[in-house]
């Protein structure tokens, strides 16, 4: 609010013979913003003393009040602007969490849940699952696979599973019974093929095709996208699908116990580390998200060893505390 705006507002209310109470309320609000405004009783006492010394203040009082309000308003506006600017600075320098730690079982479990079967894995663990139709699933770290106990035998003939986490699917071909993977806000439909799916809570869902053909669609029922081998589809939180060439070695590294990243974005590397060890990932600088690194390391070692190897690269500082890895500028 500009100084002239405050003056005009006060002058208009006085000319109308109204708003004296509103003026006092405005004064108090501005005073609270500044922290040094006198209360209503003090203000009235000061005006009575002024009038006793100078007689009928009349227009002088109006002019002084206008100046008084304008000065307070200007100071309050400055205080508010500083607050907004400071908030923006803090926000831009704030923590960017790209992966969240989850509650996981201590060992691989396979249990019946009503009419479904649920398989879950702990951190740093993979598990092979043989489905009733002969399809095979390699379930990744911290993942959950759910499928009907009468898998593929229901009336519609659809073989459908639900996945949270990541898995490698080798689907047995059956033209009469499509195979569907529901994961996050994404649906993948195939007849028989080999592909990866990754869909952890809070992260974008993706499909990488190794061979065969798949159709990927978002949960909003939009038109599906067909993938060719060596490509991936990424579905963001808005349901938009992006198709691009995939880094097969990086995507499938977990299936043979390796971190295999060649000129990969640091965000992707750290999210993979987060999902393997079940730790949160937090970047303290947005520019670090897109830094590209080469990183090949065994998954059989401890998180501390992995972070030491990353620190040796010299691109950032990696620290672990309270279930979260923080990445900061050096």
Image (cartoon, helix red, strand yellow):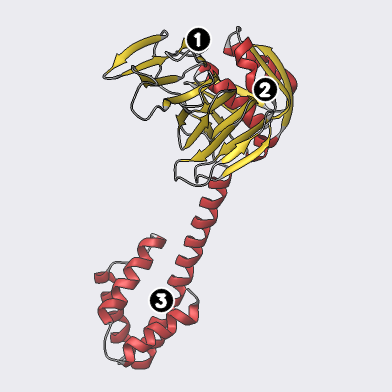
Which residue position holds label 2?
250
In terms of sequence position, does the residue under pointer 2 or pointer 3 come before the other? 3
Check contact, mark 2 vs mark 1: CB within 8 A: no
- Is 88 in front, or is 217? 217
Where residue 161 sits: x, y (%)? 42, 24
Q: Crowding near pointer 3: few (<14 within 10 Å), some, many (20+)?
A: many
Say which quarter of the image contains residue 21.
bottom left
- Is 245 in front, or is 86? 245
Say which quarter of the image contains residue 9.
bottom left
Which residue position holds label 1?
128
Quick one: quadrant of the C terminus? top right
Query: Left or right: 83 with respect to 17?
Result: right
- Residue 57 visible: no
Q: Crowding near pointer 2: few (<14 within 10 Å), some, many (20+)?
A: many
Q: CA distance from mark 2 to mark 3?
A: 64 Å
Residue at x 29%, y 72% (from the top left corner):
25
Where residue 286 sits: x, y (%)? 63, 40
Say which quarter of the image contains residue 234.
top right
Q: CA distance from mark 2 to mark 1?
A: 20 Å
> Residue 69 — which label?
3
């Amino acid at each position: 609010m500009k100084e002239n705006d405050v003056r005009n507002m006060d002058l208009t209310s006085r000319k109308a013979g109204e708003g004296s109470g509103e003026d006092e309320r405005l004064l108090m609000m501005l005073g609270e913003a500044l922290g040094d405004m006198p209360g209503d009783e003090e203000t009235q006492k000061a005006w009575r003393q002024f009038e006793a010394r100078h007689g009928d203040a009349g227009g002088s009082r109006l002019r002084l009040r206008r100046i008084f309000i304008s000065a307070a308003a200007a100071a309050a506006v400055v205080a508010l602007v500083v607050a907004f600017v400071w908030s923006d600075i803090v926000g831009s320098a704030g923590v960017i969490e790209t992966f969240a730690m989850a509650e996981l079982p201590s060992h691989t479990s396979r249990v019946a849940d009503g009419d479904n079967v649920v398989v879950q894995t702990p951190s740093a663990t993979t598990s092979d699952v043989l489905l009733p139709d002969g399809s095979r699933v390699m379930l990744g770290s911290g993942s959950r696979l759910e499928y009907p106990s009468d898998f593929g035998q229901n009336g519609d003939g659809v073989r459908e599973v639900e996945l949270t986490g990541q898995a490698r699917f080798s689907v047995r071909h059956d033209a009469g019974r499509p195979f569907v993977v529901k994961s996050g806000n994404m649906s993948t439909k195939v007849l028989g093929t080999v592909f990866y799916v990754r869909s952890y809570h809070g992260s974008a869902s993706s499909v990488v095709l190794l061979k065969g053909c798949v159709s990927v669609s978002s949960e909003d029922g939009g038109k599906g996208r067909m993938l060719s081998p060596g490509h991936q589809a990424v579905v963001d939180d808005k349901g938009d699908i992006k198709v691009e060439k995939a880094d097969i070695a990086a995507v499938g590294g977990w299936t043979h116990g390796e971190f295999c990243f060649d000129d990969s974005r640091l965000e992707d590397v750290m999210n993979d580390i987060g999902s393997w060890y079940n730790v949160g990932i937090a970047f303290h600088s947005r520019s670090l998200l897109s830094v590209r690194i080469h990183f090949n390391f065994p998954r059989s070692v401890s998180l501390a060893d992995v972070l030491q190897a990353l620190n040796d690269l010299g691109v950032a500082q990696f620290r672990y505390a309270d279930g979260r890895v923080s990445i900061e500028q050096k």
